[in-house]
Amino acid sequence: MEGKTKSYEMDISDIPLLEYTNIFVGNLTWINRGIDKDIATFDLVVRDMPEYWNFYLFDGLERFIDILLNFHFDSEAIRLFKKMGLIDSKKTENFYRNFKFSGDVWSMKDGTVFFPGEPILRITAPIVEANLLTAFVLNIFGYPIRIISKTARLKFVSEGTFFVAASIVRLPGLEQGMGVIRASYLLGGSVNAVPLFFRKFKQYTPPNKILANINHAFIKSFNTEKEAYRYVLDSLMEKMELFWVMVDTYDMKKGLDLFIREIKKTPKVDFKKFMITVDSGNIKKQVFYVRKTLDKNGLNNIGIEAMSNLDEYIIDDMVKDKTPVNCYISATALINVVDNPRFEAVYKMAELIHQDGTIEQKAKLTKGKESYPGRKQIFRIYKNGKIKEDIIGIEDEKLGVPMLHKVISKGKRVGKEKTLEEIKKNIEKELKTLPTAFKAIKKPVKYKISISKKLSKMVEELKKKHLQ
């Protein structure tokens, strides 16, 4: 209900107001000039990528569609606009009061591999509608794309080792927690430790027995470390599926020795249910020590999980050194995408169709920040099932497999919402098309992207018009 949302919370009616006032001034101008029904095409393009990344995965489409089709301005927004002078006529007021997206959207599928410089989303709508989506479009895809791409890199270096990338601690914001959980599931990581996954995706049955992290707070709540371990072994063992046991609350070596003594004298123990957590000091060195100590005591079936600011670079180093880890936990470095803290995306007009039918191609020609004109398509060429080249061309060309698909037509969704399983399958299919070199963590590979002759000709015509 209007007026009920607390100041630090957001709902869909708040999202349109995240725009800078210049966006609304533009709309006010176009409405007063009578060109508000001119049809504009805008592209979303990601300009660059971190030094060692070789690809992005597209994600965030389903959330984008859901919000876009519910995009509206409530009566509180109308009153605010009047006070700010952003509504100066009944026509302008009616536009905002009756706003409903009526245009078309072409997009990549969630889970699709893409590269900087490619239009990953195309919106064609009345200019006043397309313009209003600027901040929304530039924001909604940033975190989903970065987190799922980084999680894919984590999957590559883990080399089949069980991994968890669903931590929601130390996030930039609580609202991003669902994106982390979702990315972990889509790339094969565990989500059993986060109940929110099962609440949001009700088709998935929560486990009867769950993973329990025997952390420092749990251990310190007992009078002694021994009492904490005894409670786990005597009272929790049958109730949980897996235990991650921290042994470094007070001293890692003493804690490990104490846990080993207690578990060895416990009857009917399924040792496979336990993993020792290593999350302090020199992680690699500590893991080798824990493995050696467990094996010396005949506890070969107790695993080791490593955490503490791990990312794909550290894990890659540990894997290459054959560090005996059974499970990697990546939290802070992963969820904050520390090697890609910014998302350099742009939302640029590419075409304008006036009400008299005149078509104008639009582009930014500034060197280093160029954008391409026209309604474009990405055409992908494969060789032996692997990606070979992308060609950016005009939508009616036939130069390869088209990567942009119509997802909204005249303000209505095309087809059904994609399920998590459908997205997961698309990711699996897309990652298989990556040549081995693209999966490397520290070796940059350049992918060939070209523009078609038809698009090149269009660019040259605009240069003659504006630069000569």
Image (spheres, rainbow, N blue to C red):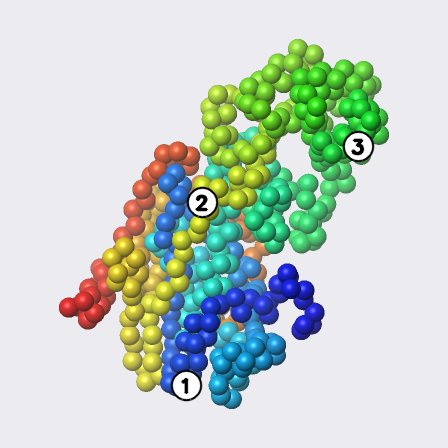
Labels 3 & 2 near each other (Cβ < 8 A)? no
Q: Which x, y percent locates residue 394?
A: 30, 63
Residue occupied by mark 3: 221
Q: Position of residue 349 (x, y in %)?
A: 35, 68
Q: Position of residue 297 (x, y in %)?
A: 70, 12
Which tag is nearer the camera, tag 1 or tag 3? 3
Residue on which the image places disc 1? 32
Of the 4 image quadrants, the one containing the N terminus is bottom right
On the image, numbered disc 2 is attached to which residue? 340
Which amino acid type is marked by label 2? Asn
- Is disc 3 placed on a helix, strand or loop? loop
Give me the residue at 50% from left, 43% from top.
Answer: 337
Q: Secondary structure at mark 1?
A: helix
Establish if 359 lies above or below 401. below
Judged from the image, the secondary structure of the residue bearing numbered disc 2 is loop
Answer with mark 3 or mark 2, whichever residue precedes in sequence. 3
